[in-house]
Amino acid sequence: MSNKQEGTRNKEIRVRMAPSPTGFLHIGTARATLFNWLFARHHGGMFMLRIEDTDAERSKTEYEIQLIEALHWLGLDWDEGPDYVDGKLVSKGQFSPYRQSERQEIYKKYVEQLLAEGKAYYCYCTKEDIEAQQQAMAASGLPPKYTGHCRNLAEPPANWQSRVVRFKTPENKISFHDLIRGKVEFDASLLGDMIITRSDGSVLYNLAVVIDDHLMGITHVIRGEDHISNTPKQILFQQALGFPQPIYGHLPLILNADRSKMSKRKNKVALEEYRNAGYLSDAMVNFLALLGWHPKDDREVLSRDELIELFDINRVQKAGAVFNQDKLDWLNREYLKKMGDEEILNALMENGAWRMENRTNKTLLKKIIPINRGRASTLRDFIDLGKFFFDLPDYAPAMLVWKDGNANDTAAVLKTLHEKLKSISPENFENRGVITSAVQEIVNGRLNRGEVLWPLRVALSGQQSSPDPLEIMMVLGKEESLRRLRMAMDKISNI
Ligand code: GLU
């Protein structure tokens, strides 16, 4: 952090997202990041990223990398980063995020200040002491909070083993105005004296957040409702340190359709999973923006620029935001419609999740895009719906037989189709008119087109539902189409 920001607060809007790198980017964190970003962009303010990695055991660099990649994918950029880390210039035009692990020395300075001003004290109680105190309190019907045993110690106990720093929590009521929830009140006397520094000297999360928000000049803290219980604690620290209070806005939780909380076990909660499932970044941003917010006119398909223009934090709802999978699919289809075949092809080629599956036959992929456009909700669907073009699935021979038909008739139809199609040149296989009239000749004189088209469809795709068999033949070409017909003939002869 550059020194010029220390202690200064400007009137412009400065917001931040502060994820912990302890797992994939959660859908709720992605939504909160987007709301902060939209708020900043709408007001021409600043948006910052701070990595909250004070939990050394759970924080991992690979998660931080994944998190940043996910934000890049969503197109959410940040405007500032530390100029120096350990005396070395780090930003060089491209901002790295602020990292709490790099800022412990800064936090300790403020702990010293609280100790010197008598607003914090060393606590020497052992785990066993605390347990005994709490049992005694519970026995007398008191809430389980720290008793304040070490608050007024004149001297440290002899032979003390370890010590933490505790904050002298005042026994007053805290109230703040939340942009989304209105007036929120909290009784601080329930908290007890909070630990602010662990026995190893590291500073705990709630105090670190307050110091960072202050030094980063954060004007608005916009975060998930799950953090609302941290807010009174953070306000108490701000008051003790003489920091101005930012404006708070707690975003509603994201719920399933049955209004249960989204959970890792039941839902896709990592943004990465949506990316791998073939959702587009623009559709995802649009969808996330509508999780708890909507513009005045109830429009739903909104580009990033439109979202920036319309975003209004005062229109964020208090009630839980329901995650509607159908809406996400619909939005994704809307964005797919706007993309040209070439653009879809590039998006398919770029996605690492499919590269791993070795589906990089670009020529074939290009041909199957227009065929599956009407049926695909996601990029992934193009791959799944088109799988049979790459590998014919193994299907039961009986599937080849049309409704009232039998194996013998089917064998005869397949044989006729094979003979007829064999006489067409490979070039003409790409000519719809030629293959249509060839197949039509076989259809003519029969009661139902299905008698011919059904076994042809199954032979070519190995599936009961597929695009038009003639289109499949045009994509597969002569050689492969005939090969598949021969395989079908073999199968039916074994019935
Ligand atoms: N580090 C917190 C989290 O990942 C966010 C805290 C905040 O936004 O104040 O949930």
Image (spheres, rainbow, N blue to C red):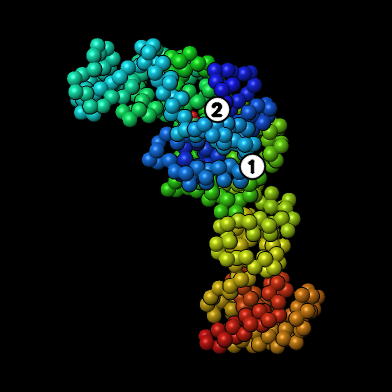
Specify the amino acid type for callout 1: Gly
Answer yes or no: is residue 304 visible. yes
Relative depth, front residue between 7 and 151: 7
Give the structural element (helix, strand or loop) at label 1.
loop
- The image shows residue 30 at horizontal and vertical percentages of 55, 39
> Which residue shows up at 34% across the image and 24% down it?
195
- The image shows residue 224 at horizontal and vertical percentages of 50, 32
The label nearer to you, 1 versus 2, is: 2
Specify the amino acid type for callout 2: Met
> Which residue shows up at 61% across the image and 62% down it?
383
Quarter of the picture containing the N terminus is: top right
Q: Earlier in the sequence, mark 1 or mark 2?
A: 2
**Which residue of the protein is positioned furthest toward the front in this rendering?**
87
Q: Which residue is mark 1?
A: 75
Is 375 located above or below residue 477 in the figure? Answer: above
Q: Which residue is mark 2?
A: 1
**Which residue of the protein is positioned furthest toward the right in this rendering?**
433
> Which residue shows up at 68% across the image and 39% down it?
304
Relative depth, front residue between 108 and 486: 108
In the displayed structure image, the side of residue 240 where residue 476 appears, left or right? right
Answer yes or no: is residue 34 visible. no
